[in-house]
Amino acid sequence: ANPSLLILSGDGIGPEVMAEVKKVIAWLDAKRGITFDVSEDLVGGCAYDRHGTPLHDDTMAKAQAVDAVLLGAVGGPKYDSLDFSVKPERGLLRLRKEMDLYANLRPAQCFDALADFSSLKKEVVAGLDIMIVRELTSGVYFGEPRGIFTEGNERVGINTQRYTESEIARVARSAFELARRRGNKVCSMEKANVMESGILWRQVVQEVHDKEYPDVQLSHMYADAGAMQLTRNPKQFDVIVTDNLFGDLLSDLAAMLTGSLGMLPSASLGAPMENGRPKALYEPVHGSAPDIAGQGKANPIACILSFAMALRYSFDLGDEATRLEKAVEKVLADGVRTPDLMGPAGGTPVNTAQMGDAIVA
Ligand code: NAI
Ligand code: MG
């Protein structure tokens, strides 16, 4: 059977950037003989418009059945006043939850041609290629008890950081597996100096390492020190694994080491399926960008690089993924620029479709 892919383009610039991924899919079919069974469906605001829900049960079932899901973006001002239960992002949250996607992969990679866009000095980021693995389904965003309660004569806001051993172990495995395919190095970040969950995190990551991945180089760092090291010398890292809260912060910090939001891909992985590969959802980090939607200004690279991650992690097509990443690198080196990438050095201005065409070429 052909590998199967469910495309959920979503709202705003989602369909615009996804159109460029479809060109890559067509190219792989025509030139490399790699054919995907592609199905498409609705998520987010457009699904709400059609079905009154941001993710129809049929779409959820399709997502569970395919090898990988590729999502564009959801949301927009039109939907801002909707009830919380049917907001566009609930569609995305449902996908992540029901597919149990516990490992969020956020690469931070610096393309030399864009090193000027970094918040840091060029020499600190040139050649940077790190991967942050954030635990996505547990921790302080989900732990009970939570709520705003009354205590004596004042209110108290409560969230609970809670991690089970198995939740830590499975995301640690994701990180070690990744490291074996990269630089073979994992740095685990927590706050074992002040948090019980951090002490357990450190113990479990070390145990999984010693039992199952002794060949991978493992280090531990307090997450605050990690933030410092990420800006002082980010190239010391290969794979960083951390919890939901710290991962939220550290992955956004790492993203800005490399430049535009229009460049950043992501993957969310779950447990291995029958074929041995993880359940997976790939999506650009950016949102639906209503301010530029419909104008041909969107940069499709984040979505294209998300598809490259799908090639590598869901379809075992690492060589094709590298080919695609090299094409992106070459187009950037040639000075091809969507508006978001147009820095002081200038370049050849292009629209969304022209950027896609240049990458395919
Ligand atoms: P956003 O990521 O959509 O846009 C932030 C800024 O970056 C805007 O100025 C936008 O024009 C620019 N930008 C984003 N992607 C770009 C691209 N590919 N090329 C060029 N420029 C790009 O975040 P914002 O404005 O906070 O949210 C807009 C809508 O998107 C909201 O409804 C929000 O809820 C939703 N959203 C959805 C996400 C998702 O689907 N995963 C993630 C973040 C926001
Ligand atoms: Mg964040």
Image (cartoon, rainbow, N blue to C red):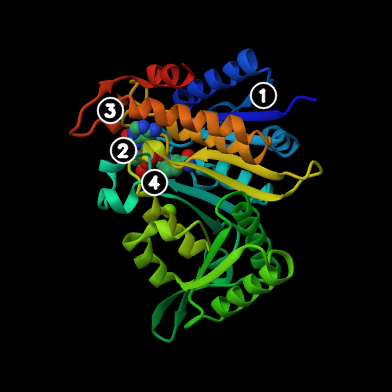
Sequence order check, earlier mark of 4 and 2: 2
Relative to 315, is 322 on the left or the right?
left
Alpha carbon separation for disc pair 4 and 2: 11 Å
Q: Which residue is mark 1?
A: 39
Circle 4 SS class: loop
Residue 339 bears which disc, if any?
A: 3
Residue contact at pointers 1 and 3, CB within 8 angstroms: no
Q: Quadrant of ligand 1?
A: top left
Residue contact at pointers 2 and 1, CB within 8 angstroms: no
Residue at 34%, 29% (x, y): give it.
Answer: 333
Circle 1 SS class: strand
Q: Give the amino acid at mark 3.
A: Pro
Which numbered mark, 1 or 4, is in the foreground of this view? Answer: 4
Residue contact at pointers 4 and 3, CB within 8 angstroms: no
Residue 127 bears which disc, if any?
A: 4
Residue 188 bears which disc, if any?
A: none
Report x, y in % for residue 67. 71, 35
Circle 3 SS class: helix
Alpha carbon separation for disc pair 1 and 4: 36 Å
Report x, y in % for residue 207. 68, 74
Decide which of 62, 324 is in the foreground and name it: 324
Name, please, the residue furthest toward the left. Answer: 344
Q: Give the amino acid at mark 4.
A: Gly
Residue at 61%, 32% (x, y): give it.
Answer: 319
